[in-house]
Image (cartoon, helix red, strand yellow):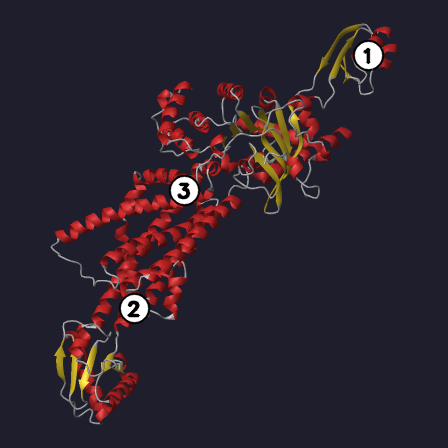
């Protein structure tokens, strides 16, 4: 065999992915499907209503912050103990109380709250006979009665003799900021979830359509399936960015046109610029993880009906994951929240919520690295599944051919029998 | 890298060898051309069913090569393995000396059996896109797409969407997309399927032109006369096995030539000169050409005073060779496929 002189001649995976992405991006952008995609934001109202129950529960749970007691050692202990005992009977009517940290004891409660040095709704100082409540106006109104009840009960004078409650009002408290940040996190999560859900479905439809058009074999013969999958994923990502730009522009026009001047959401812990940056990254990662899973499903299915059957559990799983991430947000640092940040499908949601509540950045770098790895694994696995399961036979299949051969052999046998007779 | 595959398989390799080891998968004797495709012992199983069972194929550069067999015989799976769309479970393949066909994707053009194009694309864009998949700049591909359409009498269809084209036109567009990047190897899976007689003729001419320009063409078909007219080599495939792979001439030579004899005398001494398999049909005797040659037979007939009216020697066709090699059942399946396609 003589020497071949051909050099390696192929597109790199990224070049091939670009060819696919360019085609898909333009095809989708100028299709009716894109119009439906632009109408997508109407769905948040429906889903938002459904998820509202859990959302408000999370917010309430997260916002039921403790009240700190900064009295004498004896009074503080008595107040905390009495509050705990009363909560068993009257529940959340009485706030949970803790003794103010030793390093803050003796400092001005007003300064502690205004400088947000501790996440308390209120600080009770003074004595049990003359308690002073320092908090925002709302919190003072809310806790005045319960604090009087706790103080009176601890002194054994309740219910006939309640102490007079003095108050010091502050503009904001650590608890207010925390609650607002939870709202910011929830809004971010909701937006992320809706976008990924819409896009995941679209990328799946796109693959099914290509199977229907039978173009997929042309692609599979020319370029690696990994590149096909990557191209499809990134095309849809590009489409989504166009969609976001359209929604953002229209939304801003409506918002500012209606006379609003600024956002009502609290600044996230990492600051708005970084929160937006992370939001875009986590949106991309959340979509890529889910999209790669949908593509793997698409690769396993031979018909549209099979795709629908297979994608239903994944859609349900996606909803569960969203609720999981949403619920885990209530307890930053808990095992559940850490699990939500590690589990690939909930990680982008949980980490975005973290960005709203915690200002540390290194953990985002770690999470993004982990999510990229998951996308790579899913894309590789999906492409491999596709090659193994889809390109497995000709259009009429081996079974029918075998059947024909069998029938023709039977015909032959019959003719031989007839000859003998 | 360029060592023949047969040398790279060790003797304990569990490759299933073609029937009775009579695979003629080497390039024809005296053919010094390098091999465009070389496959040894390709095996592919799907869910416990062996779709392809030990296929050996060698296709020299510049050849027109046919893979002949009924539907479901394993043709498409074999082509897909050769192109790297799927990997074999066993065996080895090389395309232009490369183990991984995707590495030389720019040199290959492929027309799958199930034709597929994006319905919303315009014809010239579809051709350009297929070129881009094989590494051609998109704009260059589109320009060449227009040129090719014009050369094939489809200039008027260049700006039409694929969904607006007839089936035959769309099929031509896809074929042109397969060729737009000027591949050195063109693989066509059932290219004649769905074409009318005129377009089949055009395609045959196109395939010949490609080969004349040095392009290797390999195509699968269940229509014997396409393979017989076009190919210098064929692989006969049935039930996933390749009982024969080699030149068309050698396949036909597997069956001795048939002699047809017409005599004035119906009986006489000359009858003893006829071979044992001689049979009479009407006025003619039919029998295989004796190994001793026609001269010896002629002498015996003349000396026996047969009164020879006519004598002709008919060489076996590829169809007879197919029946002889692949068996009656495979031949019937092939005929059934042809009949089904004609009915469609």
- B299 above or below A132? above
Q: Which residue lies furthest to the left in this view?
A: A259
* C-alpha distance separating marks 2 and 3: 42 Å
Q: Report which residue position mark 1 lands on.
A: B297
Name the secondary structure under disc 2: helix
Q: In this view, does A82 lie above or below A224?
A: below
Circles 1 and 3 on the same subunit: no
Disc 2 to disc 1, C-alpha distance: 103 Å
Query: What residue is drawn where x is 27% and y is 88%?
Result: A77
Q: Residue A286 carries which label?
A: none
Residue A406 visible in the displayed image: no
The residue identified by callout 3 is A14
Residue B128 percent coordinates (x, y) = 39, 30
Residue name at image x 58 percent, y 21 percent: B230
Identify the image quadrant of residue A89.
bottom left
Q: In this view, does A282 lie above or below B88?
A: below
Residue A157 location in percent, x, y? 20, 94
Structural distance between the alpha carbons of marks 1 and 3? 71 Å
Q: How crowded is mark 2: few (under 14 residues within 10 Å), some or many (20 or more)?
A: many
Check the residue under mark 3 and report the chain it is in. Answer: A
Labelled disc at residue A58: 2
Q: Mark 1 lies on which chain?
A: B
| Chain to which the residue tagged by mark 2 belongs | A
Q: Do labels 2 and 3 share a chain?
A: yes
Taking the image as drawn, is residue A230 in sight? yes
Mark 2 touching mark 1, by CB under 8 A? no
The answer to which of marks 2 and 3 sits earlier in the sequence is 3
């Amino acid at each position: 065999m003589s020497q071949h002189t051909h050099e390696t001649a192929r597109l790199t995976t990224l070049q091939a992915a670009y060819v696919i992405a360019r085609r898909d991006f333009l095809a989708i952008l100028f299709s009716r499907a894109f119009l439906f995609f632009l109408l997508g934001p109407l769905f948040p109202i429906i889903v938002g209503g459904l998820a509202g129950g859990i959302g408000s529960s999370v917010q309430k749970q997260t916002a039921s912050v403790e009240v700190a007691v900064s009295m004498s050692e004896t009074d503080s202990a008595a107040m905390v103990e009495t509050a705990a005992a009363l909560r068993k009977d009257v529940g959340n009517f009485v706030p949970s109380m803790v003794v103010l940290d030793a390093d803050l004891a003796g400092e001005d409660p007003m300064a502690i709250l205004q400088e947000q040095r501790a996440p308390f709704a209120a600080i009770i100082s003074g004595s049990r006979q003359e308690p002073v409540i320092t908090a925002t106006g709302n919190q003072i109104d809310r806790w005045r009665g319960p604090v009087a009840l706790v103080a009176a009960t601890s002194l054994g004078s309740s219910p006939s003799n309640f102490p007079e409650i003095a108050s010091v009002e502050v503009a904001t408290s650590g608890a207010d900021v925390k609650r607002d940040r939870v709202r910011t996190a929830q809004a971010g999560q909701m937006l992320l979830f809706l976008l990924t859900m819409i896009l995941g479905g679209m990328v799946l439809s796109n693959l099914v359509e290509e199977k229907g058009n039978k173009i997929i074999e042309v692609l599979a013969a020319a370029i690696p399936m990994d590149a096909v999958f990557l191209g499809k994923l990134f095309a849809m990502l590009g489409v989504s960015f166009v969609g976001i730009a359209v929604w953002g522009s229209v939304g801003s026009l409506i918002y500012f046109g209606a006379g609003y001047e600024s956002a009502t959401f609290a600044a996230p812990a990492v600051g708005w610029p970084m929160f937006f940056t992370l939001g875009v990254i986590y949106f991309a990662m959340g979509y890529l993880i889910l999209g790669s899973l949908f593509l793997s499903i698409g690769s396993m299915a031979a018909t549209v009906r099979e795709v629908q059957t297979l994608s239903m559990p994944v859609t349900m799983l996606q909803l569960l994951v969203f609720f999981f991430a949403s619920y885990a947000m209530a307890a930053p640092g808990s095992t559940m929240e850490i699990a939500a940040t590690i589990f690939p499908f909930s990680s982008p949601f949980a980490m975005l919520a973290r960005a709203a509540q915690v200002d540390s950045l290194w953990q985002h770098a770690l999470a993004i690295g982990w999510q990229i790895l998951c996308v790579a694994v899913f894309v590789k696995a999906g492409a491999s599944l596709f090659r193994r399961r889809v390109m497995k036979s000709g259009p009429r299949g081996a079974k029918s051919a075998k059947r024909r051969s069998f029938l023709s052999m039977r015909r032959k046998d019959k003719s031989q029998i007839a000859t003998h007779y | 890298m360029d060592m023949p595959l047969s040398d790279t398989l060790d003797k304990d390799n569990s490759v299933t060898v073609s029937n009775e080891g009579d695979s003629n998968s080497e390039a024809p004797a005296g053919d010094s051309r390098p091999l465009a495709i070389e496959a040894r012992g390709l095996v592919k199983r799907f869910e416990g069913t062996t779709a392809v069972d030990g296929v050996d194929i060698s296709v020299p550069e510049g050849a027109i090569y046919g893979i002949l067999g009924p539907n479901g015989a394993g043709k498409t799976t074999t082509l897909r393995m050769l192109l790297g769309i799927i990997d074999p479970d066993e065996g080895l393949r090389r395309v232009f000396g490369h183990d991984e066909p995707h590495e030389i994707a720019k040199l290959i053009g492929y027309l799958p059996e199930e034709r597929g194009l994006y319905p919303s694309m315009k014809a010239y864009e579809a051709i350009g896109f297929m070129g881009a998949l094989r590494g051609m700049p998109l704009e260059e591909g589109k320009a060449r797409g227009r040129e090719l359409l014009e050369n094939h009498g489809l200039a008027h269809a260049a700006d039409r969407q694929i969904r607006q084209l007839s089936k035959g036109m769309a099929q031509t567009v896809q074929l042109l997309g397969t060729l737009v990047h000027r591949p050195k190897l063109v693989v066509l899976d059932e290219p004649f399927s769905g074409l009318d007689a005129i377009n089949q003729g055009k395609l045959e001419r196109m395939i010949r032109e490609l080969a004349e320009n040095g392009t290797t063409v390999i195509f699968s078909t269940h229509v014997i006369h396409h393979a017989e007219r076009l190919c210098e080599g064929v692989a006969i495939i049935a039930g996933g096995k390749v009982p024969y792979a080699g030149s068309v001439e050698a396949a036909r030579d597997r069956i001795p030539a048939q002699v047809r004899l017409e005599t004035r005398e119906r009986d006489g001494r000359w009858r003893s000169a006829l071979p044992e398999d001689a049979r009479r049909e009407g006025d003619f005797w039919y029998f295989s050409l004796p190994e001793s040659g026609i001269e010896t037979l002629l002498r015996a007939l003349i000396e026996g005073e047969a009164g020879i009216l006519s004598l002709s020697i008919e060489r076996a066709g590829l169809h007879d060779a197919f029946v002889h090699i692949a068996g009656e059942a495979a031949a019937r399946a092939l005929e059934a496929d042809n009949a089904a396609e004609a009915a469609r």
